[in-house]
Amino acid sequence: MLDSLFLSFREGLEAALIIGIILATLSQLNRKHLAKVVGFGTIAGVIGSLILGWGLFTFAQSISHEAEEIMEAVMRIVAAGLIAYFILWLHRNQQVAGKIKGQTEKSSSSKIGLFLLAFLSVIREGMELMVFNMTKISESAGTVALGSIIGIIAAALVAFVIFKTTIKLNLSLIFKALGLILVFLGGEMFAEGIVELLETHSEAMEILFLAVFIVPALFILLKDDMARFRRAA
């Protein structure tokens, strides 16, 4: 449940912050009337995520136990891949808020472009969460769903506090902190997925694959920070 809670919190927070930045940028551009377009895109993204999630969950329920185990292992590796992509994305996009603002400014001249920006931002996070939750298909669906719901509610509350109060937070720092936790979760998923597919339950093999994922991921995530630390020293 804790894994589902954290992952849904991260995905939900990212989606909420992105939508919040889009709305704030529109306000700065004196285009508040386009907020409805963003709202429609957000709702469409949520609905799309729910439909895709329901479809995949229904499919998972229809397969045999052996196939379910294989699917869970594969989804763990896919989830680890998504985490690796996030780490690379974070490394290449240090100024998260600035990048989103730039995309909003480019899209603000077109309602369709703005709708798609909101829609794709939300459904991307929804699909990632769906993949993460599919690594838990052998667990109780109620437990996974409860963790996801709590995480999403917590993310919405945090995003609300950020945008409705004078609290100023460094989004890059937030994502980096979440990224650090994700590195270890991703390493666990990667190692468990590989070991499951190889049908070897060697603890040494699991530790090896854990290190294969975690070491380079941490290096990429903290590379710039380590360089700044060396320069400061």
Image (cartoon, rainbow, N blue to C red):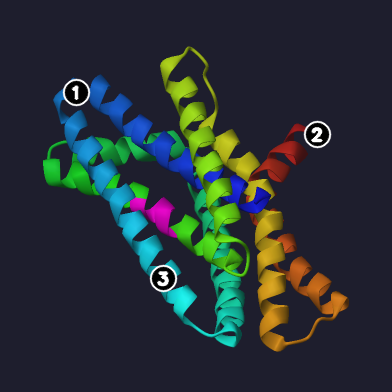
Residue 82 visible here? no
Secondary structure at numbered mark 2: loop
Up/down of 164 relative to 15, above or below: above
95 displayed left or right of 47:
right
Which residue bears the numbered disc 2?
A: 233
**First reached walking from the N terminus: tag 3 or tag 1:** 1
**Residue 167, image x, y percentages:** 52, 16
**Residue 42 x, y percent position in the rendering:** 29, 42
Name the residue type under label 3: Thr
Mark 2 or 1, nearer chain start: 1
Residue occupying image coordinates x 48% and y 22%:
162
Q: In front: mark 2 or mark 1? A: 1
On the image, the x and y values in percent for residue 178 come to 62, 43
Give the camera-side residue of 192 and 106: 192
Structural distance between the alpha carbons of marks 2 and 1: 47 Å
Residue neighbourhood size for the residue with mark 2, other residues' Cα within 10 Å, grouped as few (<14), some (14–19), many (≥20): few
Callout in the foreground (2, 3) = 3
- Whether residue 124 is in magenta: the answer is yes
Instruction: Indicate which disc residue 58 carries.
Output: 3
- The residue range painted magenta reads 123-127
Q: Nearer the viewer, mark 3 or mark 1?
A: 3
Gap between marks 2 and 3, in whole Å?
Answer: 55 Å
**Which badge, 2 or 3, is on the more N-terminal residue?**
3
Q: Secondary structure at mark 3?
A: helix
Q: Which residue is mark 1?
A: 32
Query: Could you tell me what secondary structure mostly forms the magenta stretch?
Result: helix
In-image side of 141 versus 17 (left or right):
right
Q: Residue at x 27, y 43 (%)?
A: 43
